[in-house]
Amino acid sequence: MADKQVWLVTGAGRGLGTEIAKAALAAGHRVVATGRDAGKVAAAIGRSENLLSIQLDVTSLDDARTAVAATLAEFGRLDVLVNNAGNFHAGFFEELSPEQVRQQIETLLFGPMNVTRAALPAMRRQRSGLVLTISSTAGITGQAFCTAYAAAKFGVEGWMESLDPEVRQFGIRTMLVEPGFFRTELLSPDSTTFAKPSIPDYAEQTRETVTAWSGMNGKQGGDPAKLAKAIVELAGLDAPPARFAAGVDALETFVAKADALRAQAAAFRELSSSLAHENA
């Protein structure tokens, strides 16, 4: 991949998206930073001759195609797509409305699919490119109060893992980043929607969880500026990793999941191995 790349970053108006755009610019790359409000994106990142700030709602395929076309018109190519835009619908499954679950998956799974669908033709023509998607440790291991979020992130994991062998033949790579808890705005009221308590059986757990998570906002251990710098470094490698565990807590999640899968495989190994057809 070229030393100086053209990046398209979604959700660049705040949090990790802003930091990724800044880190890419600092490394000398050209950046198309996008968000629902282009003015807010530009204000968050600051002025640069290598920056183009444009409006993009990732749930709109038309917006995605327009953003990619603007990237190509301004800079002539697209080397790194960062699917970062997202939000968080938190709550117990029974208390999340069907509309909230659909909206969560629309933003976190179909959104990145829209932008990637728009970007891949240009990358195929170049015979190069990197599709980098911000997932989560919730895409590795599910947990209570994260059913909608984890469903979307697990979907992202399977989609990206399956996309990789399809596009690798064209010189295009994929990379998943699974952050643990970073000090971004994900737990802020602007990004997180808590399900309204409606079932008494969950009431106490809901109060405790909402209080705990709200109290974590702004106190998470991970530094998004450091993560952004690491992402830019990894994107410059000839062979970026398929997955990157971002943070000590993410590393622990990876190891625990691997250990759990090994234990589950071993627990019923004999029964699992006995299911072949007798006439095979």
Image (cartoon, grey):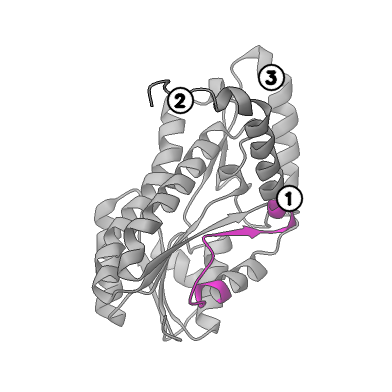
> How far from the left and from the top, in percent, is residue 75?
31, 81
Residue extending farthest to the top is 200
Tell me: 63 left or right of 92: left
Mark 1 and mark 2: Cα distance apart in space: 36 Å
Q: Is residue 14 magenta?
A: no
Q: Which residue is mark 2?
A: 276
Residue drawn at x 68%, y 26% is: 206
Quarter holding the C terminus is top left
Circle 3 Cα neighbour tier, 10 Å, few/some/many (<14 / 14–19 / ≥20): few
Q: Which residues are magenta?
A: 233-252
Give the mark nearer the N terminus: 3 vs 2.
Answer: 3
Disc 3 residue type?
Ala
SS for dot 3: helix
| Disc number placed over residue 252 in the picture, else none | 1
Residue 204 is situated, as x and y percent measured from the top left of the image, at 74, 21
Image location of residue 266, percent across then percent down: 67, 32
Query: Is residue 58 visible to us here?
Result: no
* Foreground residue among 183 and 245: 245
Q: Which residue is mark 3?
A: 203
Amino acid on which disc 2 is placed: Ala
Seen in the picture, residue 147 relative to 234 is either above or below; the reply is above
